[in-house]
Structure formats: C-alpha cells, structure tokens
Amino acid sequence: MAREQDLLQEIGQMLVDTGPESANVIVVRIELYPQGDACKYEFDYVDSSDKTEWFRPSARAVGDLTELLVKLRNRSLLSGKTVWTKCEINFDVLRNKLKINYGYDEIV
C-alpha cells in the first residue's frame, strides 16, 4: 500500500498538472461518498491578483484524484482512525505546499 506522503505528493502534482497556469493557489472541496469510490467536487483557484475563479479539470484527472483520495481514506480506515467523509485541499503552487482539512460526518 502506498505511503501517505507518496499519496499527498501525487495529489499535489496532479493539481499542478490539471490546474490553470495562472493559479497561485488551487482549492478543491471534496465530499467522498461512503458507499464507494465516487466524490462530489468543487475546484477553484486564486490567481496573482487574488481573484478566485472555478475551473473544470479533465474527467481523467477527476478519476485519478478520486482513486488517490479513496486510497488516502482507506489508510485511515486500516489504521483504526475515524474515517473522514469530506475534505478541503489547499495547494499553494508558488510555495509547493499542500494542506488538507478533513471533515467528518456527525454521529446522531
């Protein structure tokens, strides 16, 4: 199984490859459905004038990103951690820094 660091590096590289050339920061909001390997996405970027715009990556990039996120979530599952169901990825293209904030469904 891929190491978490390797998965994060692949996610960052994929965002650089698929994001707009004018992007300084890429923001992706994701809801990962618990019953399988499907996600709901929102892709945005911030350019050099701090203007935020949305973008649509290729279907292949979305599929590859979904596969990486499922692997990342499965690492949490196998390690006994609480499994996240959503996340927000912030990738600072200029500094090559990736940050992921995980979200969890509330248990009622």
Image: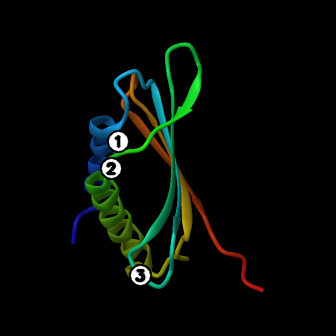
What type is the residue that disc 2 sits on? Ile
Q: Is 25 situated above or below 2?
A: above
Q: Quadrant of residue 66?
A: bottom left
Q: Residue at x 34, y 51 (%)?
A: 8
Q: Nearer the viewer, residue 55 or 7?
A: 55
Q: Classify residue 79 as left or right of residue 101.
A: left
Name the mark on residue 11: 2
Report, in whole angstroms, how far the alpha carbon at label 2 lies from the one at label 1. 6 Å
Q: Which residue is mark 3?
A: 36
Q: How is the image coloured?
A: rainbow
Count neighbours of disc 2 (C-alpha within 10 A) and say few if under 14, some if 14 to 19, many if 20 or more: many
- Residue 100 coordinates in the image, percent (x, y): 50, 50
Count neighbours of disc 1 (C-alpha within 10 A) and say few if under 14, some if 14 to 19, many if 20 or more: many
Secondary structure found at label 1: helix
* Marks 2 and 1 close (CB-CB < 8 Å): yes
- Residue 84 coordinates in the image, percent (x, y): 54, 70
Q: Is 19 situated above or below 39?
A: above
* Marks 1 and 3 close (CB-CB < 8 Å): no
Q: Is 68 situated above or below 58?
A: below
Q: Residue furthest top?
A: 49
Of labels 3 and 2, earlier in sequence is 2
Q: Classify residue 86 as left or right of residue 61.
A: right
Q: Residue at x 27, y 59 (%)?
A: 64
Q: Quadrant of the N terminus?
A: bottom left
Q: Which residue is mark 1?
A: 15
Secondary structure found at label 2: helix
- Residue 12 coordinates in the image, percent (x, y): 33, 43
